[in-house]
Amino acid sequence: MRFKAMLATTLLMVSTVTGAADEKLMIGRFSASDLKDWQTKSFKGETRYTFDDRSGQRALFADSQGTASGLYREIRVDLNRTPWLNWSWRVDDVLKGVDERSKAGDDYPARVYVVVSGGAAFWKTRSLVYVWSSNQTVGATWHNAFTSNARVMALRSGTTDAGRWVSEKRDIRADFRRLFGEDIAAIDAVALMTDTDNSGQRAVAWYGDIYFAVR
């Protein structure tokens, strides 16, 4: 009986660890053409978001021609359980002659936002913005040109990885601590946007599934 009790305890521990390691919170199931719970936010005109297979896999396709609108999903994510944000994206070309650190050049072929709400104190809302930069060095970070409450990080740059799918994995708590100097326990929304309203150029991109996980 004692052996059976020990065995049962061991199996329970293994099951718990396995369950934790496999935990995943799906944010965007774009491979299933699913935009349920996603909303649109327009800044200038409408970037066209549709689903297609032209990139080699089913994904969310974004097409901007001098426009700026994004998609966002409000969802509370416990970073103590699932701190890592995972997604894939593809860009075939980048923008020409833009200064992304200026208001006139604040355009990107692809970007993914993680938002921490300030609640009633809306001015305290902060955003991490991961971008496929046209010309900044990979790993570079800077303040968004329009607000000090958004910090931008270049994960890809130029055409080095253009024309193929690439995957990203970011520890949100670590990045937030690095760029804002704060330790957060949760985020409140995720957004994405392809925009060219400032430069007037055209940009297209594809976004794969987005999810939070233990790793």
Image: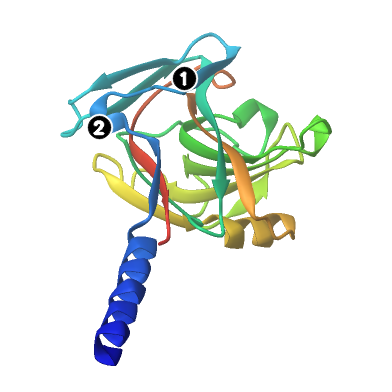
Considering only vertical position in the picture, is 130 above or below 108? below
The quadrant in which the C terminus is found is: bottom left
- Give the camera-side residue of 12 and 47: 12
In-image side of 20 versus 2 (left or right): right
Considering only vertical position in the picture, is 170 above or below 40? below
Q: Residue 118 in the image: x percent, y percent?
A: 76, 37
Looking at marks 1 and 2 on the same chain, the residue that comes earlier in the sequence is marked by 2
Mark identifier at residue 201: 1
Q: Which amino acid type is marked by label 1? A: Gln
Considering only vertical position in the picture, is 124 above or below 38? below
Q: Residue 126 in the image: x percent, y percent?
A: 71, 41
Question: CB atoms at circles 1 and 2 under 8 Å apart?
Answer: no
Whole-number angstrom distance, CA of label 1 to CA of label 2? 28 Å
Mark identifier at residue 101: none
The quadrant in which the N terminus is found is: bottom left
Q: Which amino acid type is marked by label 2? A: Ser
In-image side of 121 versus 63 (left or right): right
Q: Residue at x 62, y 49 (%)?
A: 186
Q: For numbered disc 1, what is the local secondary structure?
A: loop
Alpha-carbon neighbours of circle 2 within 10 Å: few (<14), some, or many (≥20)?
some
Q: Residue 34 in the image: x percent, y percent?
A: 32, 24
Q: Residue at x 80, y 39 (%)?
A: 124
Q: Residue at x 70, y 37 (%)?
A: 117
Q: Residue 147 in the image: x percent, y percent?
A: 75, 35
**Residue 196 visible within the image:** no
Residue 211: quarter of image? top left
In-image side of 126 versus 40 (left or right): right
Residue 36: quarter of image? top left
Q: Which residue is mark 2?
A: 31
Q: For numbered disc 2, what is the local secondary structure?
A: helix
